[in-house]
Image: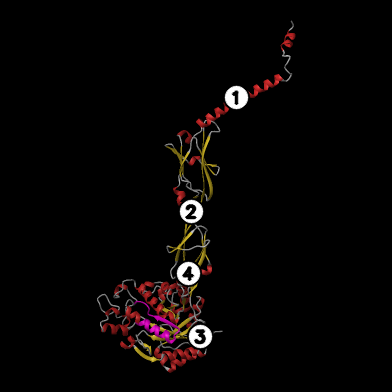
Amino acid sequence: MHAHEQNVDSVDPNQSPGKTTIVWSRAVILTVLLCALVAGVILLVGAIFGKPTLTALSPEPVSLFGPSTLEEAIFVVESDSESLQAANWSLDGTDVTSQARVANGRAELAFEAIADGPHRLAVSSSGALPWSTATVAWTFTVDTTPPDIAFSPESLVAERDEAHQITGTVDPGATLTIAGRDITLTDGAFAIELAQPPQDALLFVAVDMAGNQSEELVRVATIPRAPDAPVRGVHVSAKAWADESLRSEILRLVEDDLINTVQLDLKDETGEVGYNSAVVLGHTIGATKSYYDLAAAVSMLHASGVRVIGRLVAFRDPILADWAWTNERWRQVVQTPDGQPYAAYGGFTNLANRRVRTYNIDIAEEAARIGVDDILFDYVRRPDGPIESMVFPGLDVDPEVALITFLEETEERLAPYRTFIGASVFGIAALRPQDVAQNVPDIADHVDYIAPMVYPSHWSAGVYDVEEPSLDPYAIVRRSLEDFVFKIEGRGARVLPWLQDFSLEVDYGPDEVRAQIEGARDAGIDEWLLWDPAVTYTSEALQRRP
């Protein structure tokens, strides 16, 4: 039998032509499924038993880091040493593995510096199979920028003695304190109400949500009060005003529009109260002389459009010092270390004594009530000379501080009258305030103007780089006044200088007086008071105002 015939005979006559193919396809599918199942089991086992385990230990979930918290933050993961050795660290996709430290089953990383903004730190370690990888990640934001405190510029300038408001904004989410007091914010904006402009700088502290802190030490610049017209005035003693001829010369200067201010002595350097004062102590000690009627003088001068400044010599007071010592009021008198009255200037009263201060303020208030426009204190200081050579009974602070107390008390008493307050100071006080207890910036906080006595004849050679001050009145006046303006800037006081209209070693005439006025003007000051103890003024040096 032929082989071909046998193959033909073995075919099932009932089988259709495509049935063999179907059987074969099922076998293939079963085989593939079986292989896939085996592979899946292998993969599952590999994934379960070959994948490393990474556990984040710190930090706790934090979304925001500031400078202090980031500095303390250490990112730590725990696993077996093999996985940790194979771990890769990446920050925002950049490899930082070299910065990580591995020890004792832990890996940690701390940043010395990192840019502000959002970040993602990831730690990954691969297992036995390429796809069996464990990953731990932190998503956080770094903010090391201090919050901004912005002030409304107009709120940093105030009118003297007026209620004031400081306004501004801070960055959203920040808190704000001033001098340790919490400030209410509305959408980051603040408005701080003050009864009057602050004399000292204010410390503002803002803290944002990341713990960043910013500080701003802010001083509100106070605009000095000023009269309607710049002061052009002359000194007139009580006796001079009582003298008809001298008074007539002063009034002629007024009529010629060469001056618009007359400074009348209330209490002078001898201790005499020159007008008809009703202050009791002045009569008790024999100081009240009543050379002129203050109310009548003020009325007459005001009728001519003249400003009246009442000069009040405060602590140089021989009459009060002598009376107090004689009547065993020793504490009212400056003394020497051995317990004797301090003899300089004929007697100096104690600026620390309340009765002495009250006496002077009583005179100031009386003059303000009568209508005097300004109270200008003179000798508002301690005696010049070594501080160790004098004793101030009851003084438990520096003399400079006691002087400020006196000015504060004066401010309070004169506030109802709106009277201007001035303080005459030594020219040298801008350079050496401790010499006479005249701290110019501090004084400026409590007066409307500083009146520096910048008489050229009173300066030492070489001061302010002026070789011979009395021979160069323009230079010494300009340079010294520029220093005074700088020292009290923003303090709420202006500078009204005393200028020299008398001769001392060097003859002073129209040119010298005019040079001082020009020096003051070039220092930014268009005001002046002329001093001549004889009350005879150089009209040729003065000009009418346009």
Dot 3: element: loop
Spatial distance from mark 1 to mark 3, Cα to Cα?
Answer: 121 Å
Of circles 3 and 4, the one toward us is 4
Residue 354 lies in quadrant: bottom left
Seen from the viewer's position, the closer of residues 242 and 407 is: 407
Spatial distance from mark 4 to mark 2, Cα to Cα?
Answer: 29 Å
Q: Position of residue 434 (x, y in %)?
A: 37, 72
Name the side, left or right, on which 285 lies relative to 453: left
Of circles 1 and 2, the one toward us is 1
Residue type for callout 4: Glu
Badge 1 crowding class, 10 Å Cα cut-off, few under 14, some 14 to 19, many 20 or more, is: few
- Whether residue 453 is visible to the viewer of this picture, yes or no, is no
Badge 3 crowding class, 10 Å Cα cut-off, few under 14, some 14 to 19, many 20 or more, is: some
Q: Are marks 4 and 1 in contact (CB under 8 Å)?
A: no
Magenta residues (range)? 359-382
Dot 4: element: strand
Of circles 3 and 2, the one toward us is 2
Seen from the viewer's position, the closer of residues 48 and 227 is: 48
Residue type for callout 1: Leu
Query: Residue tagged by mark 3?
Result: 542
Query: Residue tagged by mark 4?
Result: 193
Spatial distance from mark 3 to mark 2, Cα to Cα?
Answer: 65 Å
Query: Residue tagged by mark 2?
Result: 210
Q: Farthest residue toward the bottom?
A: 244
Query: Residue tagged by mark 1?
Result: 34
Of circles 4 and 2, the one toward us is 4
Badge 2 crowding class, 10 Å Cα cut-off, few under 14, some 14 to 19, many 20 or more, is: many
The image's colouring method is secondary structure
In percent of the image, x 44 and y 71: which residue is there? 199
In percent of the image, x 73 and y 16: which residue is there? 14
Answer with mark 4 or mark 2, whichever residue precedes in sequence.
4
